[in-house]
Amino acid sequence: MNIYFSDYFRVSTDDLDEYGAFNVSLINDLPVFIDPFLLFSSDKDKYESLHQEIIKYITFLREMSDKGVISKGLVKHWFLFPEVKQNWLGYSKVGNGGLGLGPKFAAALNDNLSTIFNDFGAEQITQSSHLEKLCLIKEGVGKDSISDFTTNLIKGYICEYTQEFAKKYIDSSRCKNVSVKHASFDYNTRRWNAKTYTLPYIDGDFVLLTPKDILTKDDAWINKHDIIGDFDAIAESIPNIELRAQINDYLLRQIPDRASQREINEAISRTLRKFPALIDHYIRFKEDHKEDAVALSEQKIKETEIVFIRQVTNLVETLRDQKSFYSQKGDTFDEAYNRIMFLKQVIENNDGYRLFYVKGEPVKRESDLQLIFRLTWYASDDDVNSEVNNGRGPVDYKISRGSKDSTLVEFKLASNSKLKQNLAKQVEVYKAANQTKKSIKVILYFTDSEFEKTQKALKELELKQSNELILIDARATNKPSGSNAK
């Protein structure tokens, strides 16, 4: 069973744990990312040095911007970076290919060098500078962009970190000397330089390990959701009474009568841009609670390891023990259907429901179910792809064997507020758009009320469970060992 780094390179998971490295899947990205705040909050000298290097580079960019318009060629060299796909982290549904940092991110960073970053490296309110400022006020710049930029700026360290582990624990036949682009920046020549490292190598590319203590999941510690949600408290924390009054007056004038929550959030965003001191006070609050950031990220990574490594490993081993699972042959519909039915059996009858529980509580994310399904295809020769948005909406997976045999697979949680609407329209639209008559809809439910809601929707739509519509019972309450779910 080759799914994870430890499988492919024949290393002990204990050695990886002791080294502090995250055991990535080499089948698909796992949904964690580097949070630059964890470099700042760490008591490790090396991490503090890396955080200072990030500040130094942004300061350099600001100085270049202050001197005049930066040419297109230098914008490309200084601002545009590919995703570091070799670390196998992120949110790709299939494989490890991402979009990287394109012109939109470059424009956002360049535009803000003279505004929110005008005091970068010389802040008066916060303890340090933070790249994450950019995602607080700029639409379209999220955790993935910040993480990709951070990963590129510390790529040399990630390579050294991986090289050290590889030389100690991995057979030399499984490693290769590779030249890695953008490994270090020379401030004298103002150029990114390549450097050669000895790294784990498989399927024509190298693989990078990442320390677990700089990884998190879901949201970075400094994030837009928090600053908007806590706006009132942040505004009240400003000691200058006059400034507080100006902020409140400006915000109230931005909010229309009978405003929706979206309109309120947009008004708050405009206020943040108008009064950037608010951002600094929010960041200072986050800095003052950096121990919480470390503890929360550690918890999230442990939970990710439980669900996507330990429990998926148990699931795949259970499936592999059923001799016909990975040796079955048929068209893509048969293979997808049989795979889903095996998953259904394991989840409903073999404690597989535990896969979706952490500390006794269900983790209700469609993306988790999709990724788990993808990981079970590791032994298949079929082409398993996530469909791009064709103008009518993206489908979760398209299983293909040549141009004449394809099957669409769509996963939904019963708790999804648009489940009935999706059942009524989505799959038929997908089949028409993708010119295939074969599709399977899978619905996962965790509670009695979710089951009843689903049954009601099916009855109203005159639908029944079939080979094309499968319900999976992930309730813990009706399983013999449900009280022990972990």
Image (spheres, rainbow, N blue to C red):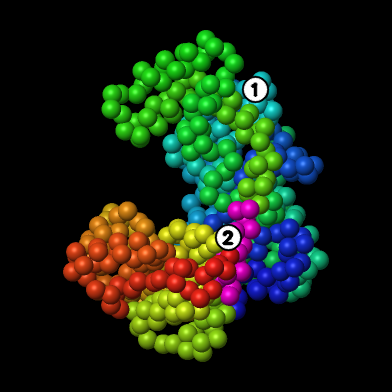
What's the residue at 25%, 64% (across, down)?
A: 456
Q: Residue at x 45, y 58 (%)?
A: 365
Residue 356 sits above or below residue 45 on the image: below
Verify whether residue 115 appears in magenta.
no
Question: Mark 1, mark 2: which one is toward the viewer?
Answer: 2
Is residue 400 shown left or right of residue 152?
left
Residue 329's place in the image compared with 427, above or below, is below
Span colored in magenta: 299-314
* Dot 1 crowding, Cα within 10 Å, few <14, some 14–19, many 20+: few
Q: Is residue 93 left or right of residue 117?
A: left
Q: Residue at x 34, y 31 (%)?
A: 263
Q: Earlier in the sequence, mark 1 or mark 2?
A: 1
Q: Please, which residue is most extreme toward the top here?
A: 242
Mark 2 sits on what residue?
A: 359
Along the line of sight, the residue nearer the viewer: 333 or 306? 306
Residue 125's disc number: 1
Q: Work out how far the residue at label 1 is from the one at label 2, CA to CA, in angstroms.
A: 39 Å
Element at badge 1?
loop
Residue 349 lies, in percent from the top left, at 47, 79
Tell me if residue 312 is in the magenta stretch. yes
Q: Amino acid at mark 2?
A: Lys
Residue at image x 55%, y 86%?
321
Residue 132, position in %: x, y? 57, 36
- Indicate the secondary structure of the residue bearing disc 2: loop
Task: Give the quadrant of residue 330.
Answer: bottom left
